[in-house]
Image: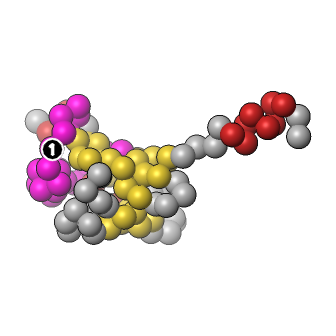
Amino acid sequence: ATPALAQWNVMKNESDSIEAAAHSVTLPPDASGSLHVVPCPRCAIVSLRASAQSAYFIGGQQVSLEELRRLAATRPDTLLVISYTTATKALRRVRASAADAR
């Protein structure tokens, strides 16, 4: 491989993100459950494993899973950005827009 191609192989993405409206996301029931999301109307469901290391945010403020769940239930059009580890499908964080919390 050329040096540029070899460097590309080393710089593989370790994480990925999905943007989805809250109404298309099922948040984990607890810290060790799974999040399920339909990223687009014709896409298959993506399941991501939550853990104690998973973090939840509204804007820049870290919140509990329950606080994020309340926001999603009352504002189903809230945009969620869901970040996960590509290789393991481990849920890293879910961030809701702070503007939707008002």
Residue 54 in the image: x percent, y percent?
29, 52
Q: Which residue is mark 1?
A: 63
Q: Position of residue 78 (x, y in %)?
A: 25, 46
Magenta-drawn stretch contains 27:
no
- Category of crowding for the residue at label 1, using alpha-carbon neighbours closer than 10 angstroms: few (below 14), some (14–19), many (at least 20): some
Q: Identity of the amino acid at label 1?
A: Val
Quick check: 31 above or below 78? below
Colour setting: secondary structure
* Residue found at x 15% / y 44%: 63
Locate residue 25, reporting x and y percent: 31, 61
Quadrant for the N terminus, please: top right
User: Residue at the spot x=49%, y=47% of the render?
Assistant: 16
In this view, the residue in front, 9 or 102, is: 9
Q: Is residue 29 visible?
A: yes
The residues colored magenta run 58-82
Quadrant holding the C terminus? top left
